[in-house]
């Protein structure tokens, strides 16, 4: 699973959201920025999804999509 384009776009430029995820997952904001750019699976953890949903207003069921093959 990976985040939807809608979720990724809502996250870009949202420093508060990135800082909340960084604090929750014990990493830096720049790491979260890299994860957003790469649509990393770390953003699909339960705690990250909860934060993303609360901060963007997107329902959790609408945050994920099947991973596209490269």
Image (cartoon, rainbow, N blue to C red):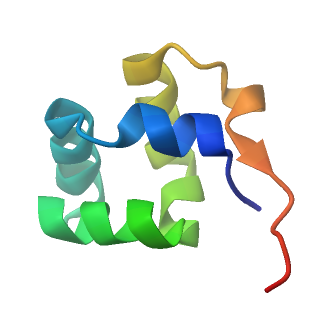
- Where is 58 relative to 62, above or below? above
Task: Give the image location of residue 46, x and y in percent.
Answer: 57, 47
Of 5 and 31, the residue lying toward us: 5
In the displayed structure image, the side of residue 2 where residue 54 appears, left or right: left
- Residue 28 visible: no
Give the total number of marks visible in the rendering.
Answer: 0
Q: Residue at x 66, y 19 (%)?
A: 59
Where does residue 39 sit, x and y in percent of width and height?
54, 65
| Quadrant, the C terminus | bottom right
Indicate the quadrant where residue 19 lies. Answer: top left
Farthest residue to the top: give it: 57
Image quarter of residue 5: top right
Please say if 51 is above or below 65: above
Residue at point 15% right, 59% down? 29
Residue 41 lies, in percent from the top left, at 58, 69
Q: Report whether 69 appears left or right of 46.
A: right
57 relative position to 18: left or right: right
**Between residues 69 and 25, which one lies in front from this camera angle?**
69
Q: Quadrant of the N terminus?
A: bottom right
Q: Is residue 64 above or below residue 39?
A: above
Residue drawn at x 67%, y 37% is 63
């Amino acid at each position: 699973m990976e985040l939807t384009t809608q979720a990724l776009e809502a996250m870009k430029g949202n420093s508060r959201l990135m800082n909340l995820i960084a604090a929750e997952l014990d990493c830096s904001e720049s790491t979260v920025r890299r994860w957003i750019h790469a649509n990393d699976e770390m953003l699909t953890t339960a705690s990250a999804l909860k934060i993303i949903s609360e901060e963007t207003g997107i329902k959790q069921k609408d945050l994920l999509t099947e991973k596209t093959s490269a």
